[in-house]
Image (cartoon, helix red, strand yellow):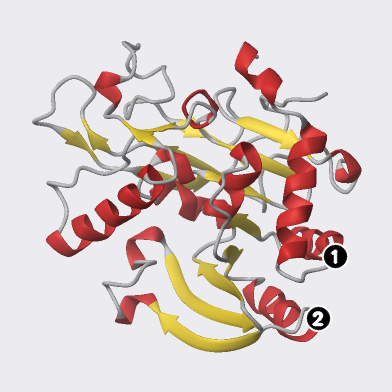
Protein backbone atom coordinates (compact mmCIF):
# COMPACT_ATOMS: atom_id res chain seq x y z
CA UNK A 1 0.00 0.00 0.00
CA UNK A 2 1.14 3.55 -0.69
CA UNK A 3 2.33 5.58 2.28
CA UNK A 4 -0.63 7.98 2.20
CA UNK A 5 -2.89 5.10 3.27
CA UNK A 6 -1.22 5.31 6.68
CA UNK A 7 -3.43 8.29 7.46
CA UNK A 8 -6.37 5.91 7.41
CA UNK A 9 -7.27 3.76 10.35
CA UNK A 10 -10.01 1.17 10.01
CA UNK A 11 -11.19 1.82 13.57
CA UNK A 12 -11.43 5.55 12.85
CA UNK A 13 -13.31 4.97 9.59
CA UNK A 14 -15.79 2.68 11.34
CA UNK A 15 -16.19 5.22 14.14
CA UNK A 16 -17.05 7.93 11.60
CA UNK A 17 -19.60 5.66 9.92
CA UNK A 18 -21.26 4.88 13.26
CA UNK A 19 -21.27 8.58 14.18
CA UNK A 20 -22.82 9.44 10.82
CA UNK A 21 -25.63 6.91 11.23
CA UNK A 22 -26.37 7.92 14.82
CA UNK A 23 -26.62 11.55 13.72
CA UNK A 24 -29.61 10.42 11.66
CA UNK A 25 -31.20 8.90 14.78
CA UNK A 26 -30.45 5.40 13.48
CA UNK A 27 -29.31 2.54 15.74
CA UNK A 28 -26.02 2.20 13.88
CA UNK A 29 -25.26 -1.52 14.22
CA UNK A 30 -28.88 -2.52 13.58
CA UNK A 31 -28.88 -0.39 10.43
CA UNK A 32 -25.61 -1.93 9.20
CA UNK A 33 -27.04 -5.41 9.79
CA UNK A 34 -30.09 -4.44 7.72
CA UNK A 35 -27.80 -3.38 4.87
CA UNK A 36 -26.18 -6.81 4.82
CA UNK A 37 -29.47 -8.67 5.14
CA UNK A 38 -30.82 -6.93 2.03
CA UNK A 39 -27.54 -6.51 0.08
CA UNK A 40 -28.02 -2.74 0.30
CA UNK A 41 -25.38 -0.03 0.56
CA UNK A 42 -24.88 3.65 1.30
CA UNK A 43 -23.13 5.81 -1.29
CA UNK A 44 -22.80 9.48 -2.22
CA UNK A 45 -21.26 12.02 0.16
CA UNK A 46 -22.12 9.80 3.15
CA UNK A 47 -19.60 7.21 1.90
CA UNK A 48 -16.99 9.89 1.20
CA UNK A 49 -17.21 11.68 4.54
CA UNK A 50 -15.75 8.79 6.62
CA UNK A 51 -12.64 8.85 4.41
CA UNK A 52 -11.96 12.58 4.67
CA UNK A 53 -14.04 13.81 7.59
CA UNK A 54 -15.08 16.88 5.59
CA UNK A 55 -16.28 19.96 7.42
CA UNK A 56 -19.38 19.71 5.22
CA UNK A 57 -21.49 16.99 6.84
CA UNK A 58 -23.77 14.98 4.49
CA UNK A 59 -27.25 16.47 4.21
CA UNK A 60 -28.90 13.11 3.64
CA UNK A 61 -28.25 9.38 3.24
CA UNK A 62 -28.40 7.72 -0.17
CA UNK A 63 -29.37 4.08 0.36
CA UNK A 64 -29.21 1.79 -2.70
CA UNK A 65 -30.99 -1.58 -2.78
CA UNK A 66 -31.25 -4.24 -5.52
CA UNK A 67 -34.75 -4.67 -6.83
CA UNK A 68 -35.29 -8.16 -5.37
CA UNK A 69 -34.76 -7.04 -1.75
CA UNK A 70 -35.64 -3.34 -1.99
CA UNK A 71 -39.13 -3.67 -0.52
CA UNK A 72 -37.70 -5.53 2.48
CA UNK A 73 -35.23 -2.72 3.16
CA UNK A 74 -37.93 -0.11 2.61
CA UNK A 75 -40.16 -1.89 5.12
CA UNK A 76 -37.28 -1.88 7.64
CA UNK A 77 -36.74 1.86 7.17
CA UNK A 78 -40.43 2.56 7.66
CA UNK A 79 -41.43 0.17 10.44
CA UNK A 80 -38.22 -0.43 12.38
CA UNK A 81 -36.51 2.94 11.98
CA UNK A 82 -39.71 5.03 11.71
CA UNK A 83 -39.03 6.93 8.48
CA UNK A 84 -42.08 7.92 6.44
CA UNK A 85 -42.38 8.16 2.68
CA UNK A 86 -42.81 11.73 1.44
CA UNK A 87 -42.51 11.18 -2.30
CA UNK A 88 -42.03 8.38 -4.83
CA UNK A 89 -40.56 8.85 -8.28
CA UNK A 90 -40.28 6.38 -11.14
CA UNK A 91 -37.20 7.75 -12.87
CA UNK A 92 -38.21 6.70 -16.38
CA UNK A 93 -41.11 9.14 -16.04
CA UNK A 94 -38.80 11.99 -15.03
CA UNK A 95 -35.64 12.03 -17.21
CA UNK A 96 -34.48 15.25 -15.56
CA UNK A 97 -34.45 13.58 -12.16
CA UNK A 98 -31.46 13.85 -9.84
CA UNK A 99 -31.24 10.06 -10.29
CA UNK A 100 -31.78 9.52 -14.05
CA UNK A 101 -32.70 6.17 -15.60
CA UNK A 102 -29.35 5.67 -17.34
CA UNK A 103 -27.92 4.76 -13.94
CA UNK A 104 -30.03 1.59 -13.95
CA UNK A 105 -32.25 3.11 -11.26
CA UNK A 106 -35.90 2.07 -11.19
CA UNK A 107 -37.49 4.16 -8.43
CA UNK A 108 -36.56 6.71 -5.80
CA UNK A 109 -38.32 7.09 -2.44
CA UNK A 110 -37.79 10.21 -0.35
CA UNK A 111 -38.14 9.34 3.34
CA UNK A 112 -38.24 11.69 6.33
CA UNK A 113 -37.96 11.41 10.07
CA UNK A 114 -38.06 14.78 11.82
CA UNK A 115 -35.31 16.78 10.04
CA UNK A 116 -33.49 13.71 8.67
CA UNK A 117 -33.77 12.58 5.04
CA UNK A 118 -33.03 9.24 3.39
CA UNK A 119 -33.06 8.93 -0.39
CA UNK A 120 -33.94 5.28 -0.99
CA UNK A 121 -32.95 4.19 -4.49
CA UNK A 122 -34.07 0.92 -6.11
CA UNK A 123 -31.42 -0.41 -8.50
CA UNK A 124 -32.11 -2.68 -11.45
CA UNK A 125 -30.52 -6.12 -11.05
CA UNK A 126 -29.19 -7.99 -8.05
CA UNK A 127 -26.18 -5.82 -7.22
CA UNK A 128 -26.77 -2.32 -5.85
CA UNK A 129 -23.11 -1.40 -6.42
CA UNK A 130 -23.68 -1.34 -10.18
CA UNK A 131 -25.30 2.11 -10.01
CA UNK A 132 -22.32 3.94 -8.53
CA UNK A 133 -20.04 3.41 -11.53
CA UNK A 134 -22.31 5.57 -13.67
CA UNK A 135 -21.97 8.53 -11.30
CA UNK A 136 -20.68 11.87 -12.58
CA UNK A 137 -17.08 11.48 -11.38
CA UNK A 138 -14.72 9.21 -9.49
CA UNK A 139 -14.96 11.11 -6.18
CA UNK A 140 -18.36 9.54 -5.46
CA UNK A 141 -17.57 5.99 -6.62
CA UNK A 142 -17.47 4.71 -3.06
CA UNK A 143 -19.91 2.93 -0.77
CA UNK A 144 -20.22 1.18 2.55
CA UNK A 145 -22.32 -1.82 3.46
CA UNK A 146 -22.71 -3.57 6.80
CA UNK A 147 -19.11 -4.68 7.14
CA UNK A 148 -16.77 -2.48 5.11
CA UNK A 149 -16.20 0.65 3.08
CA UNK A 150 -15.17 0.34 -0.57
CA UNK A 151 -13.28 3.07 -2.45
CA UNK A 152 -12.89 2.49 -6.19
CA UNK A 153 -10.16 5.10 -6.87
CA UNK A 154 -8.12 5.46 -3.65
CA UNK A 155 -5.05 6.93 -5.36
CA UNK A 156 -7.19 9.90 -6.42
CA UNK A 157 -9.93 10.01 -3.79
CA UNK A 158 -7.63 10.05 -0.76
CA UNK A 159 -5.79 13.01 -2.31
CA UNK A 160 -9.13 14.79 -2.91
CA UNK A 161 -8.71 14.56 -6.68
CA UNK A 162 -11.46 13.48 -9.06
CA UNK A 163 -11.78 12.89 -12.77
CA UNK A 164 -15.09 13.19 -14.65
CA UNK A 165 -16.90 10.05 -15.77
CA UNK A 166 -18.64 11.81 -18.65
CA UNK A 167 -17.80 14.19 -21.47
CA UNK A 168 -20.03 17.23 -20.97
CA UNK A 169 -20.03 17.85 -24.74
CA UNK A 170 -21.43 14.40 -25.53
CA UNK A 171 -24.59 14.58 -23.41
CA UNK A 172 -27.76 16.66 -23.43
CA UNK A 173 -27.63 20.24 -22.19
CA UNK A 174 -29.91 19.35 -19.28
CA UNK A 175 -27.68 16.44 -18.20
CA UNK A 176 -24.56 18.57 -18.66
CA UNK A 177 -25.91 21.28 -16.34
CA UNK A 178 -26.88 18.67 -13.75
CA UNK A 179 -23.43 17.09 -13.92
CA UNK A 180 -21.72 20.48 -13.73
CA UNK A 181 -23.78 21.35 -10.63
CA UNK A 182 -22.50 18.17 -8.93
CA UNK A 183 -18.91 19.00 -9.87
CA UNK A 184 -19.28 22.53 -8.49
CA UNK A 185 -20.77 21.17 -5.25
CA UNK A 186 -17.80 18.91 -4.61
CA UNK A 187 -15.32 21.57 -5.75
CA UNK A 188 -16.68 23.80 -2.98
CA UNK A 189 -15.96 20.92 -0.58
CA UNK A 190 -12.27 20.92 -1.45
CA UNK A 191 -12.18 18.42 -4.33
CA UNK A 192 -9.93 19.18 -7.31
CA UNK A 193 -11.29 18.02 -10.67
CA UNK A 194 -8.83 17.13 -13.41
CA UNK A 195 -9.15 15.47 -16.77
CA UNK A 196 -7.18 12.24 -16.67
CA UNK A 197 -4.60 13.44 -19.20
CA UNK A 198 -3.62 16.13 -16.64
CA UNK A 199 -3.15 13.73 -13.72
CA UNK A 200 -0.22 11.48 -14.59
CA UNK A 201 1.11 9.68 -17.66
CA UNK A 202 -0.13 6.12 -17.57
CA UNK A 203 -0.30 2.84 -19.45
CA UNK A 204 -3.60 2.61 -21.31
CA UNK A 205 -5.62 -0.46 -20.46
CA UNK A 206 -3.70 -0.99 -17.21
CA UNK A 207 -3.94 2.11 -15.05
CA UNK A 208 -7.26 2.34 -13.16
CA UNK A 209 -7.89 5.95 -14.29
CA UNK A 210 -7.78 4.94 -17.96
CA UNK A 211 -11.18 4.44 -19.65
CA UNK A 212 -9.68 1.56 -21.62
CA UNK A 213 -9.09 -0.35 -18.36
CA UNK A 214 -11.74 -2.87 -17.32
CA UNK A 215 -12.31 -2.84 -13.57
CA UNK A 216 -14.09 -5.17 -11.14
CA UNK A 217 -14.91 -4.94 -7.45
CA UNK A 218 -12.27 -7.61 -6.90
CA UNK A 219 -9.28 -5.96 -8.56
CA UNK A 220 -6.24 -4.59 -6.77
CA UNK A 221 -6.96 -0.97 -7.72
CA UNK A 222 -9.84 -0.63 -5.27
CA UNK A 223 -9.52 -0.26 -1.51
CA UNK A 224 -11.58 -2.22 1.02
CA UNK A 225 -11.58 -0.94 4.60
CA UNK A 226 -13.22 -3.45 6.96
CA UNK A 227 -15.14 -2.37 10.04
CA UNK A 228 -13.17 -4.09 12.84
CA UNK A 229 -16.17 -4.77 15.06
CA UNK A 230 -18.09 -6.39 12.20
CA UNK A 231 -15.53 -8.30 10.13
CA UNK A 232 -16.94 -11.64 11.25
CA UNK A 233 -20.47 -10.83 10.09
CA UNK A 234 -19.64 -12.13 6.61
CA UNK A 235 -16.46 -13.52 5.08
CA UNK A 236 -13.81 -10.80 4.89
CA UNK A 237 -12.89 -11.82 1.33
CA UNK A 238 -16.38 -10.97 0.05
CA UNK A 239 -16.00 -7.35 -1.07
CA UNK A 240 -19.22 -7.08 -3.01
CA UNK A 241 -22.94 -7.49 -2.45
CA UNK A 242 -25.07 -10.13 -4.11
CA UNK A 243 -24.33 -13.18 -6.19
CA UNK A 244 -22.80 -11.30 -9.10
CA UNK A 245 -20.03 -8.74 -9.27
CA UNK A 246 -19.66 -5.74 -11.57
CA UNK A 247 -17.32 -5.15 -14.50
CA UNK A 248 -16.96 -1.52 -15.44
CA UNK A 249 -14.80 1.16 -17.02
CA UNK A 250 -14.76 4.93 -16.87
CA UNK A 251 -16.37 7.14 -19.47
CA UNK A 252 -15.49 10.64 -20.56
CA UNK A 253 -12.78 12.20 -22.72
CA UNK A 254 -9.99 10.12 -24.20
CA UNK A 255 -6.75 10.13 -22.17
CA UNK A 256 -4.65 11.88 -24.80
CA UNK A 257 -7.05 12.87 -27.60
CA UNK A 258 -9.68 15.27 -26.21
CA UNK A 259 -11.66 15.19 -29.46
CA UNK A 260 -12.60 11.57 -28.72
CA UNK A 261 -14.40 10.13 -25.72
CA UNK A 262 -15.36 6.82 -24.17
CA UNK A 263 -18.73 5.56 -23.05
CA UNK A 264 -18.99 3.93 -19.64
CA UNK A 265 -18.94 0.12 -19.75
CA UNK A 266 -21.04 -1.46 -17.04
CA UNK A 267 -22.24 -5.04 -16.68
CA UNK A 268 -22.79 -7.66 -14.01
CA UNK A 269 -20.66 -10.79 -14.27
CA UNK A 270 -19.93 -13.91 -12.31
CA UNK A 271 -16.58 -13.47 -10.55
CA UNK A 272 -14.90 -16.20 -8.46
CA UNK A 273 -14.84 -15.11 -4.83
CA UNK A 274 -11.23 -16.23 -4.55
CA UNK A 275 -9.98 -13.30 -6.65
CA UNK A 276 -7.61 -11.07 -4.73
CA UNK A 277 -8.97 -7.91 -3.13
CA UNK A 278 -6.87 -4.95 -2.04
CA UNK A 279 -7.72 -4.68 1.66
CA UNK A 280 -6.27 -2.46 4.37
CA UNK A 281 -5.95 -3.84 7.88
CA UNK A 282 -4.52 -2.23 11.00
* Depicted 38 relative to depicted 201: above or below: below
Quadrant (top left/top right/bottom left/bottom right) for the N terminus: top right
**Secondary element at image label 2:** helix
* Residue lying at 73% horizontally and 47% vertically, measured from the top left: 16
Q: Are marks 2 and 1 in contact (CB under 8 Å)?
A: yes
Q: Quadrant of the rendered structure where residue 67 is?
A: bottom right
Q: Is residue 99 left or right of residue 27?
A: left
Q: Observer-nearest residue: 142 or 23?
A: 23
Sequence order check: which comes first, mark 2 or mark 1?
1
Q: Quadrant of the rendered structure where residue 101 is?
A: bottom left
Q: Is residue 66 visible?
A: yes
- Label 1: how many Cα within 10 Å (few below 14, some 14–19, many 20+): few
Q: Is residue 180 left or right of residue 4?
A: left
Residue at the left extreme?
A: 259
- Label 2: how many Cα within 10 Å (few below 14, some 14–19, many 20+): some
**Disc number for residue 189:** none
* Residue lying at 65% horizontally and 21% vertically, measured from the top left: 5
What residue does disc 2 label?
A: 80
* Depicted 270 relative to depicted 83: above or below: above
Q: Observer-nearest residue: 213 or 199?
A: 199
Quadrant (top left/top right/bottom left/bottom right) for the C terminus: top right
Count of picture labels:
2
**Disc number for residue 30:** 1
* Residue lying at 60% horizontally and 38% vertically, measured from the top left: 52
Q: Give how far apart the Cα atoms at labels 2 and 1 are.
A: 10 Å
Across and down, in percent, residue 141 comes to 49, 43
Amino acid sequence: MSTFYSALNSHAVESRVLHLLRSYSLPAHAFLTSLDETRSLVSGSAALWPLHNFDCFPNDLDVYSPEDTAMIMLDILRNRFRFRICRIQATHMHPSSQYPIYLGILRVYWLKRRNHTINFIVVQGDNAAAAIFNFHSTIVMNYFNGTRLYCSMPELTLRKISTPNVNLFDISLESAWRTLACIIKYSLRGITFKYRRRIVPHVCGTDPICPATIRTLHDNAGLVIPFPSRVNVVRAADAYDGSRSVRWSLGGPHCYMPEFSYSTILECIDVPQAEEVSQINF
